[in-house]
Image: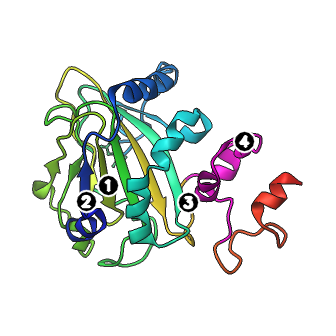
Amino acid sequence: MDHPGELEQNGYVILEGVLKRHRIDALRRELEPHFDRRLFGRNPFEGRKTQRIYGLLSKSRLFDGLVEHPAVLDACEATLGPGFLLSVAHAILIHPGEVAQSLHHDDSFYPLPRPRKALGVSTIWALDDFTEDNGATRIVPGSHHWNGEETDESAAQPVIMPAGSVLIFLGTLYHGGGANRSTGTRLGLTIQYCPPWARQQENFILGVSADEVPDLSPRLQELIGYGIHPPFMGHVDGRHPLKALHT
Ligand SMILES: O=C(O)CCC(=O)C(=O)O
């Protein structure tokens, strides 16, 4: 499948069977103690019946492989160009009774008029089966071309996909969490990327402890911000940030 071409044309692509059962279970186990804190969304956008675990890279190294998944990185490179950055990585557990989240696009905080090129690539990794009833992400195919003044709720479709799938979509595509009318929870991870010159949503330099940075792969170090976007964006006192970290 030509993912970048499909992504550009439809605004999204769904890859099934990317994670095997044992890996899904391991990821779920890492999140359990954090969900046990029973912290819920603080506003309708986060979801009053939704739990979010932010800062995944500061909680476990098991998420690194998802952030660096080659199919996702290829899609990012095609859309955002070389040197793109990780913008945010968090988990979303939608509980029964949650209402649908409002439709939005993830690169909306870059205040540039639409229609325009995407200034982000987002992913939603399904760690549960996403069904019509349990809060599957809703997307509006083709809405990456919208001019930003219309949001047609009736055009939204649920992304039905088995656990282990990943939905990849452009930062310009309208989408939102679904209402959970089932009796179980729906677990997904959202991992998002931005162009190399844009501000990341998460501050990884503070979020990932400096002691842990050497444990990350060189690619992941670069993705979270330990790199230079030519000619000199990201320097520390005129030097590469990794040199500054090691002295
Ligand atoms: O959880 C989902 O399915 C989507 C959530 C989302 O789009 C968001 O919180 O920005």
| Residue 194 visible at all | yes
Confirm if mark 3 falls within 8 A of ligand 1: no
First in residue order: circle 4 vs circle 1: 1
Residue type highlighted by circle 4: Ser
The residue sitting at 63% across, 59% down in the picture is 222
Secondary structure of residue under mark 3: loop
State which quadrant residue 52 falls in.
Answer: top left
Q: Are marks 2 and 4 in contact (CB under 8 Å)?
A: no
First in residue order: circle 1 vs circle 2: 2
Which residue carries the number 3 mark?
200
Dot in front, 4 or 3: 4
Dot in front, 1 or 3: 1
**Category of crowding for the residue at label 2, using alpha-carbon neighbours closer than 10 angstroms: few (below 14), some (14–19), many (at least 20):** many
Q: Are marks 1 and 2 in contact (CB under 8 Å)?
A: yes
**Category of crowding for the residue at label 1, using alpha-carbon neighbours closer than 10 angstroms: few (below 14), some (14–19), many (at least 20):** many
- Measuring from the top left, give residue 161's x and y in whole percent: 20, 40
Q: CA distance from mark 1 to mark 2?
A: 6 Å
Image vertical order of residue 174 relative to residue 210, above or below: below
Which residue carries the number 1 mark?
168
Secondary structure of residue under mark 2: strand
**Category of crowding for the residue at label 3, using alpha-carbon neighbours closer than 10 angstroms: few (below 14), some (14–19), many (at least 20):** some
Q: Is residue 230 left or right of residue 190?
A: right
Which residue carries the number 4 mark?
209
Report the front residue among 46 and 170.
170
Please state the total of marks drawn on the protein image. 4
Question: Magenta segment range?
Answer: 202-228
Q: CA distance from mark 1 to mark 3?
A: 18 Å
Q: CA distance from mark 4 to mark 1?
A: 28 Å
Residue type highlighted by circle 1: Ile
